[in-house]
Amino acid sequence: MIAIVTDSSVGYSTEEISSRGILSVVPLNYQLGPNFYEEYASGRNGNYMQMMSQLSPCKTAQPTLNNFIRTFSSLVDRGCEVICIVLSSALSGTYSSACFAAAQVGGNIRVVDSLTVGPGMHLLVDEAVNMVKYGLSADEILEHLETLKKKIGLVFTVESLDRLVFGGRLNNAKAKTTLNLRPVFELKGKILFRRNARGARERLEEMISFVPENTRRLIVSRCGEETDVSEFTQMLKERLPAVYIHQRVAGPVLSIHVGAGAFGAAYILKD
């Protein structure tokens, strides 16, 4: 049997994890003020947005080595082959931690650097789960994942650069959030600044221009329930009327890095 392991930035709900059956999710860690937490499934993390606005520092950390070792050991003991898909190694030490844990546990464990995060990982992990259900071998799945992760993209914007700069994920001095300017970024393994858009409409148009016409699945993600993505979603529907658009709310770990009001879209391309 093949088991899929991922980290909590994937953003699945408890029900989604259960429905996938062969999936295990290892929690990332975060700090809000003096308190430390593990990131749970979507909808189970409390009012983290309000806490972020009131407490300092707000930081994140990769999963503990013991959590990976425990998860891997349990699956290997049950005779499973393990494929572990984690967030981009350019953004976190999670990949290195998973590789070290796999070496410690032994057995047939392969770790995949997704080159993405959050909704992008959601798309990739869903593909892996479906390939297991279709009966592909671990080697076949790994080969397909290497191709698929190059077909996944993520475009996003933020209201403030403070969180990205504080977390060390951005060092591009050209990105601005002054006056009426807002930056547009892509995630291609690492965060890439594309341009500063002037005004709300120009920002949405610029973001949508980075979503290819041969997209087959889309996830719109926002930081905070109150962030309005209705116009963004409508513009995407007009550009890609045949593509169903899923809606997600970013969990605490991603929210700490992008801040309130951030939003974006992850896509996967047709073959």
Image (cartoon, rainbow, N blue to C red):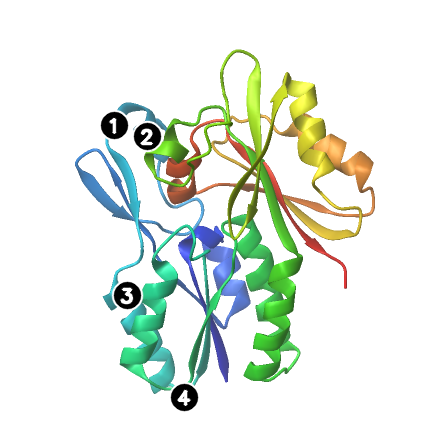
State the image coordinates of residue 62 (x, y, percent, origin top left). 31, 54
Using the numbered discs, state the Cα–Cα distance from disc 2 to disc 4 in whole angstroms. 42 Å
Q: The disc labelled 3 sits on which kind of residue? A: Asn
User: Foreground: 210 or 79?
Assistant: 210
Using the numbered discs, state the Cα–Cα distance from disc 3 to disc 4 in whole angstroms. 19 Å
Residue 114 lies, with reference to residue 217, above or below; the image says: below
Q: Is the Cβ of the residue at disc 2 closer than 8 Å to that at disc 1? A: yes
The kind of secondary structure element at disc 4 is loop
Circle 2 residue: 52
Residue 79's tag is 4
Using the numbered discs, state the Cα–Cα distance from disc 1 to disc 3 in whole angstroms. 27 Å
Quadrant where the image shows the C terminus: bottom right
State the image coordinates of residue 200 (x, y, percent, origin top left). 64, 19
The kind of secondary structure element at disc 2 is helix
Q: The disc labelled 1 sits on which kind of residue? A: Leu
Q: Residue at x 75, y 46 (%)?
A: 212
Q: Residue at x 21, y 33 (%)?
A: 33
Q: Earlier in the sequence, mark 4 or mark 1?
A: 1
Q: Earlier in the sequence, mark 1 or mark 3?
A: 1
Circle 3 residue: 67
